[in-house]
Image: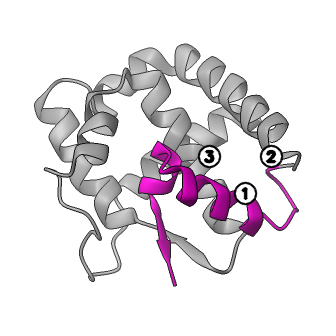
Amino acid sequence: MTKRGGAICAALVLAGCTTGSGPTRELTDSAVQRLVMMPTPAYYATLTIASQVAQNCARYRYDAELDSAMNERRNELGRGSLSAIAQRDGIELETDVSQRSFTAKHGVALQGADLCPAADAEVLQGSLISVMLVPV
């Protein structure tokens, strides 16, 4: 499996993970709604980056409960994990472009670096990546 294919699988697996505490935001939150309505490739690219940021910053966790709730809603709309399989190539391309953009924007690598300053910047900006980051 390619590195990008692994990232897609990881995003899809995260969609099924829960910790039992419930999502930190409601599906009716305007930022969450923007994520729900995103095109599938951009949606999965955003979730992949948010997951990578959370994995490399001890101050934040990835909101897997919100991910799961959004995936259910997107499946109802025909845009969730069930439709993502057919768009795998587009998701891989969008994820690659988005990761490069994130790396250039913050001057950090997504793997093996402390991403807390980048996470803090995303939260301050109120980015869609930050929607998935929960302070611990």
Answer yes or no: is residue 2 visible: no
State left or right for residue 129 relative to residue 109: left
Mark 2 vs 3, N-terminal side: 3
Residue type for callout 3: Ile
Residue 119 covered by magenta stretch: yes
Q: Quadrant of residue 112?
A: bottom right
Residue picked out by circle 1: 118
Amino acid at circle 1 = Ala
Which circle marks residue 49 in the picture? Answer: 3
Q: Which residue is found at the position 71% from the left and 26% from the top?
A: 96
* Element carrying mark 2: helix
Give the magenta-colored segment's residue range. Answer: 110-136
Q: Secondary structure at mark 3?
A: helix
Residue 128 % position (x, y):
46, 44
Q: Do the CB atoms of the residues marked 2 and 3 lie less than 8 Å apart?
A: no
Cα gap from disc 1 to disc 2, whole angstroms: 6 Å
The x and y percentages for residue 14 are 44, 57
Give percent across and percent down for residue 77: 14, 27
Residue occupying the point 11% across, 33% down: 76
Query: To which quarter of the image does residue 86 belong?
Result: top left
Instruction: For marks 2 and 3, give the one nearer the viewer.
Output: 2
